[in-house]
Amino acid sequence: MQPLPIDAYLPDIAQSVVQHSITLIDAPPGSGKTTRVAPHLMRSLAPGKKIYLLQPRRLAARSVATRIAQENGERLGDAIGYSVRFEQQVSRDTQLIVATEGILVRRLQDDVAISDISLVLLDEFHERSLDADLLLAMLRRVQQTLREDLRLVIMSATLDATAMRAGLGDVPIIQVPSRQFPVTIRYRPPSPQVPIVDHVAETLVDIVGQRPDDTLVFLPGAGEIHRCIDLLKKSRLDRDFDLLPLYGAMPIEEQMRAIETGPRQRIVLATNVAETSLTIPGIKTVVDSGLARVLRFSPDVGLDRLVLESICSASATQRAGRAGRVAPGVCFRMWSEASDRARAAFLDPEIRRVDLSGAILQLVAWGESPAADFPWLESPRIDSVDSSMRLLERLDAMEFGKITDVGSRMARLPLHPRLARIAIEAAGRGCLDAACVVAAMLADRDPFDRRDSRPRTGGANIPTYAPRRWDSDCAERLAAIDEFMRTGNDQTVFGTLLRNPLRGIIQSAEQIRRLCGPLIDRSESKSHASDEHEQVASEALLRSLLAGFPDRLAKRRAHGRTQGIMVGGKGIALGPQSGVMDPEFFLCIDVEQKPGDALVRQASRIDLEWLQGSNRMEREELFFHPTQKQVVARRRSLWIDLILNETPCAISDESQCQEVLYAAVQSHWEQTFPSEDPAIGAWIQRVRCLRQWMPELELPAYDEARLREVAYELCRGKRSLEQVRTGPWLDWLSAPLTPQQRAALEREVPAKIEVPSGSWIKIDYEEDKPPVLAVKIQEVFSWRQTPRIAGGRVPLLLHLLAPNQRPQQITDDLASFWRTGYAEVKKELKRRYPKHSWPEDPLSAQATRR
Ligand code: ADP
Ligand code: MG
């Protein structure tokens, strides 16, 4: 075996693993972490127990297992094997299993104690896939509860030690110093308008002739890799060089060819699988496109999708480093040095950028609650957790915080929960094949070139677009792909069908189909015997889509219109790409968020009768009718929160009716409170005045809040504002008064007072003002003093009226008026009103109403 830097540290590592439950290893690429640590620990520790070495990528898992087996003189599948999503090579005797994290997550579902496993190594941990975060947390939980003896090793070439210790506590870190040759960086940005793949190809044609060594090219994906190889072949580079693609979805033998050295000079064109995980020997030149596909949550489809992005600085450094492994090297960067500064330093871990519902489903299936003190390295955002739980409930995967049967089956499929739900439904309805293609289309890149999808006229090969009407854009896309497979016609109503993305989709569809194999009931068989069958098949597909997108149901606003309202209350409008013009209800499968109505690119019909199950609710809902000004009840049929239909009905829930009416009263207070009713208004003023004048009575405050309390009581059993307005306000207002308080009210602030003429005259009360008695002068002859109320504390303010009812004098000192002002008033008024009584001495005169 060739000596590697890690060799000298293996005894330390073994000792640390024995002593500590978690050990970190920080060692540069190529030092031997991946290939040496696990076999060493296998030999030195716990013989008879299994060791898992976990890789973030399937491709890496297989090639790592092969390499380790080779180095240790073993046949793959004996003592050393691998297990990834679509294949495995293990036997009963396999002791070291190289796998992806997802494999162990699913194993933990069936066997929490994993008692046959002594050690788990998480390699390339800096990639921080959601699976890796989830698995680490699950394994720590197992350590805390059942398996104190379980050992974990976390390995990386770029470990953020501070962050790790923040999450894991004071764990030991074994550091291997870097052995790296200098790498010269050359910046070579493309000219404007030149596509990146063309620029990479031109650069390669330029440089590879001058350099005798192997070259590693980083491109974002398989499509770009194949396009670049085509361009290189056009330049005849394939005559002198081996052009070797390297990406995750390739067959293992081809990958091995890229990794192994051969007689000819090699150009390896790779995705970021070659960034840190795979060792490709002999590389001295790196060409970096600066791009990668990154998994991000896409709100458009409610799934995670790969998004083309500029790589972060940390990745760019890793990629360049690949050129300095054997000798000083060169890295050509396809961007300008100036643009380097705009690069993000690190890529966010997946737990912060992808949908969590898959991880939450695993947790719930495991009997954990994600909100509790689950030992995440870094806790996910609580709002993402909440929305994931809500989605899982709507997908019938959870109920009352617990996993359901459907949920358990979903958790077994390594697919996004939406797609898993669609697959389970489709398997039950006998349309799994079609559903797998639709699922792959949703998860992958759109295979239709949208630039072509605008209606056009003329042209020999270009079809003209008749107005389109159909049930489902998804089913119609499927049909277009079917036709292409049969006839090779790539001109579709959705635009030109692009072969590369389509190839990817067909491949993913086949993989999904294989994963779902166990779901299939053997008796189901596909048949296209008759139209009727096709209709049933298409209905089955549309219903399966509903299972996966229950939160995307929309109702058309009116027949013939493109606008609708979706679950959640969001307005939507069908885009010109959609032909779903007739159905009243449809799913908005692909939605572009916009201010105002969101744009729906793909929709799919739903029949009202398909809307059954836990998302469907029948409810009597009460609301205040703004024109009738009363509470009315509607029997509403809802899907989640979307109103499917409603009919008027009688009100049965009185207490809710009271609440709804009261809410309306509050917002219509001016119209409801009978402030213009003299009895009520005056009564309130009397109490308020008395409360001020005689605080010892301890009268309650008749403020706004008390009036509203009374209004609330008056809403009981009532329907309309009018009923409240005309209700027995006084009864309710006076209800809290004691008999003593009531008596005091009548005695101390009487509504009326008897004057010498024998009339009973109203007293006007207003808070913070003296009480006013407006009375004709003739009626109060013989009153010597101003009368007082409130236990004699407050004099009335007399408005002494002339016969025309106008106040002639305002005074609270009647005695003084008689003495001084009366003579003057009498002189003036006697002329104007000679028939009235104007005695010389009003104190001894007979009071009169006339
Ligand atoms: P690390 O995980 O620390 O990056 P590896 O264990 O993957 O390092 O590789 C250590 C060394 O082993 C590499 O530098 C390389 O020389 C050699 N090596 C690893 N895998 C292969 C392989 N498949 N073919 C040839 N050499 C390999
Ligand atoms: Mg490695």
Image (tube, grey):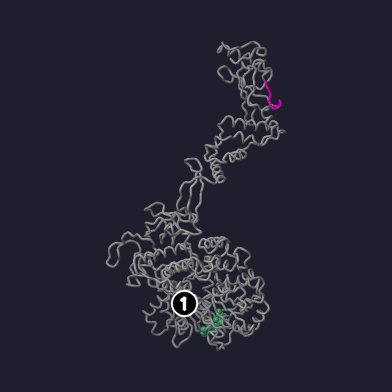
Magenta stretch, main secondary structure, is loop
Q: Quadrant of the N terminus?
A: bottom right
Q: Which residue sits furthest front?
A: 523
Q: Is 220 colored magenta in this rendering?
A: no
Q: Return the residue at label 1.
A: 247
Q: Does any atom of ligand 1 lie closer than 8 Å to the CB of label 1?
A: no
Quadrant assignment, res 122: bottom right
Looking at the image, which residue is at 37% across and 82% down?
Answer: 236
Looking at the image, which residue is at 38% across and 84% down?
Answer: 239
Which secondary structure, mark 1?
A: loop
Whether residue 334 is visible: no
Whether residue 420 is visible: yes
Q: Is 789 colored magenta in this rendering?
A: yes
Q: Point out residue 61 in the picture as x, y percentages from the top left corner.
A: 53, 79
Q: Which residue sits furthest right?
A: 696
Q: Quick check: 695 above or below 354? A: above
Q: Point out residue 179 in the picture as x, y percentages from the top left corner.
A: 58, 81
Q: Point out residue 799 in the picture as x, y percentages from the top left corner.
A: 61, 22
Report the side of 802 relative to 433 (left or right): right
Q: Quick check: 718 above or below 345? A: above
What amino acid is at disc 1? Tyr
Magenta segment, which residues?
786-793
Quadrant assignment, res 48: bottom right
- Mark 1 closeness class: few <14, some 14–19, many ≥20 residues within 10 Å: many
Q: Quadrant of the C terminus?
A: top right
Please tell me in which quarter of the rendered image ligand 2 is found: bottom right
